Image: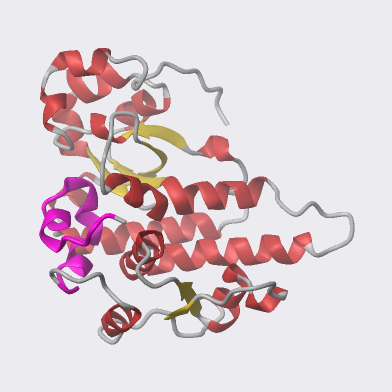
Amino acid sequence: MTEWNQQTLLQAPLFAPLQPCIARLPQDTFPSLDDLNALLHTQEITVQSGHALYFVPQQTGKLGFESQYEPRCYMTGEVQTRADNWHDLLNALVWLTFPKAKAAINTRHYQALRQALEPNSSQRGAVRDTNTLMDESGVIVACANKELAQLLRGFQWRKLFWQRRAEVQQHMGFYVFGHGLYEKAIQPYVGITGQGIILDVAAEFFAWTPDVQLAHLDEKLATFWANDANCRSTRELSPVPLLGVPGWCAENNDASYYDNTAYFRSGRRSEL
């Protein structure tokens, strides 16, 4: 297991959304459940059933519906979290950073699982697949320029990240959301790619302080995800090659970096 190093994470641009929480965790020892629950004492987080969020040890063995991860979270507010486990630690930190959005995704998971219990219903479906993809690999893309959003949707990576680099830095923001993606970002590699949900924001968004930005995005994503008309297909998410984002790796300061078509792939997508 990769050792916990608070300072390394605090200096990594991909971890920017989580850094306020990371700064309040131990410097040199892997955070415990007690450390995570202590952070909950400074903010009130509830799931959509109204129960307060709390991190608890993972239950093992064959579980009934109410004890499974998503139903238990929705019905009791208890988030099962394994000790000394990066994946679960990062999930907890995303809960602390984007509580409303995580609660909305948990609700959609719970509703889909309840429907799956009905006769003639498949265990999984497009809604759950979309929820899982966002929960594990999601990237929130805040954008105040529709042309830039279209370039991203159209896989126009060189034009977006190089030719219009200054505009991207002024009018787009990339915020890793998926805890599985954060786990990969501990040791980032060429090829690391997230699944982006593009949220329109006003131009003044980029003048706000980071805490206000995160709260705004949390609210917007939660509202978007709570709408049953949305998040019904994985095609609603757009690939985002993370190391192409300006400033997220030193190598992308050279135009030739974007010549790597194995990473910056072309693609076509019909309008939804």
Q: Is residue 185 above or below residue 38?
A: above
User: Residue 270 versus residue 16: which sits nearer the camera?
Assistant: 16
Q: Residue furthest right?
A: 119
Q: Is residue 256 above or below residue 182?
A: above
**Magenta span: chief secondary structure:** helix
Quarter where residue 73 is shown: bottom right
Q: Quadrant of the N terminus?
A: bottom left
Picture coordinates of residue 222, whole percent (x, y): 45, 61
Picture coordinates of residue 235, whole percent (x, y): 55, 35
Residue shown at the point (29%, 87%) measured from the top left: 41
**Position of 213 compared to 234: left or right?**
left
**Position of 13 compared to 180: left or right?**
left
Residue shown at the point (80%, 64%) measured from the top left: 117
Quarter where residue 119 is shown: bottom right
Q: Is residue 233 above or below residue 259?
A: below
Picture coordinates of residue 62, whole percent (x, y): 69, 72
Picture coordinates of residue 109, whole percent (x, y): 61, 61
Residue shown at the point (21%, 51%) measured from the top left: 205
Q: Quadrant of the C terminus?
A: top right
Q: Is residue 219 above or below residue 121?
A: below
User: Residue 70 versus residue 58: which sits nearer the camera?
Assistant: 58
9 in the magenta segment? yes
How many callouts does the rendering have? 0
**Magenta highlight range:** 2-26
18 in the magenta segment? yes
**Position of 139 compared to 76: left or right?**
left
Quarter where residue 195 is shown: top left
Residue shown at the point (19%, 20%) measured from the top left: 162
